[in-house]
Amino acid sequence: MRVIVVGGGVVGTMHAWQAVQRGHEVVQIEREAEARGASLRNFGQIWVSGRAGGEELDTALRARELWERIGAEVPGLGFRAIGSLTPVRNAREHAVAEAAAARPDAAARGYKLVTAAEAREINPALRGAFEAALWCERDAAVEPRTAQLHLREALTAGGRYTFLPGREVREVAGPGAVRDDHGDVHRGDVVVLATGAWLSGLVRELVPDLPVRRVRLQMMQTAPLGEPLTTSVADADSFRYYPAYASGALDALAAEQAQAPIAAAHKMQLLMVQRLDGGLTIGDTHEYEHPFAFDTLEDPYEHLAEVVESFLGRPLPKIRHRWAGVYAQCTDTTRVVHRQQVADGVWLVTGPGGRGMTCSPAIAETTANELGW
């Protein structure tokens, strides 16, 4: 079988990986020289802990298995089974963490409520003030800025994979075929459009009423911390944004403890991961209303820096990078992904939302199984 993958991000690359692993020939087309969208502008977290139960959790757990397996084959991914800690500072936040640790699926997620002292044994860099933490053992991390590069190197070495950058696919040119802006037609048995947040142009022509929206976020990265941050770190505001934490305790938190005004205005939470070079990736905000702002705002960065410093008990290293990114999310946020046949032999796979990095290996595996690769 010959598979044409349109899109060089992590979802597209994982579809290429699945196809090659199953013995097929793959041509992957990317409109930029390299992927530049949400697949790079994220935390690199394999984030099992906050996922809703059912299909979403099953997908995340399967993806976690696949990431570890692929990481063993491709060491350059920097796969690390580091887990995560969410420190809590008062009785309301503690109650939400306690409710999460009592979920029927808590063991599958690796949830455990730990004391502040136990949290510092797990992650000694957390020297700030908090009273307990939710430990999530199943969370992991990879290096988002280089993951696709290393995956493509491994794919190319197999001899059945071709990467074509700098080509924008403009039209469907027949069953299992697309034409790019060079005028070249790429024919296969199946085409997968994994175009991420690029929802205009060909995608809009094929699916004018696509039930997917775009979401913008801001993030930053620091100079090396100078010591290991042995886990990912979230704050209690993350409880408000992830469905796994839904409970009566969370309802009480929402009713009785308002977010800081800046955090509420920008729909913020703290997520933080240490990169292999020692720097910290920190975010994030959420913006849903179009048109998105073209600039980044300082107030959210200042809020995040304060939260991080309060957990670390020390000043944040110098901020070296700030950026904004846009990802695609199903308007029905309970859906893991939007997968649709849009023409004869052509499938669109988009809208995983903030789950893209986490779930992409399992999303691609499901596509391959459903299409009979």
Image (tube, rainbow, N blue to C red):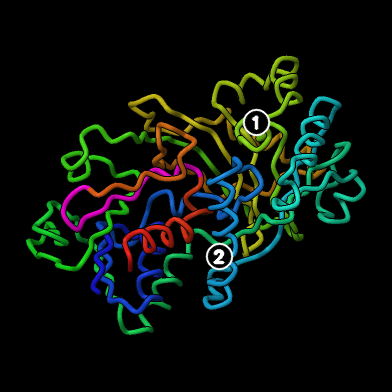
Left or right of residue 69: residue 18: left
| Residues packed near mark 1 inside 10 Å, few (<14), some (14 to 19) or many (20 plus) | some
Q: Is residue 329 above or below residue 41?
A: above
> To which residue does mark 2 refer?
67
Kind of residue indicated by mark 2: Trp
Mark 1 or 2: in front is 2
> To which residue does mark 1 refer?
303
Left or right of residue 118: residue 306: left
At x 84%, y 44%, the residue is: 113
Left or right of residue 301: residue 160: left
The image shows residue 79 at horizontal and vertical percentages of 60, 67
At x 82%, y 36%, the residue is: 98
Q: Is residue 353 magenta?
A: yes
The image shows residue 223 at horizontal and vertical percentages of 63, 54
Screen quadrant of the N terminus: bottom left
Screen quadrant of the C terminus: bottom left
Q: Residue furthest right?
A: 117
Numbered label attached to residue 290: none
In front here: 124 or 81?
Answer: 81
Secondary structure at numbered mark 2:
helix
Q: CA distance from mark 1 to mark 2?
A: 32 Å
The image shows residue 299 at horizontal and vertical percentages of 58, 28
In front here: 266 or 253?
Answer: 253
In front here: 353 or 128?
Answer: 353
- Of the image marks 1 and 2, the number of the one nearer the N terminus: 2
Q: Which residues fall within the magenta stretch?
A: 342-354
How many numbered marks appear? Answer: 2
In front here: 188 or 197?
Answer: 188
Left or right of residue 113: residue 282: left
Q: Quadrant of residue 168?
A: bottom left
Q: Is residue 189 magenta?
A: no
At x 16%, y 54%, the residue is: 344
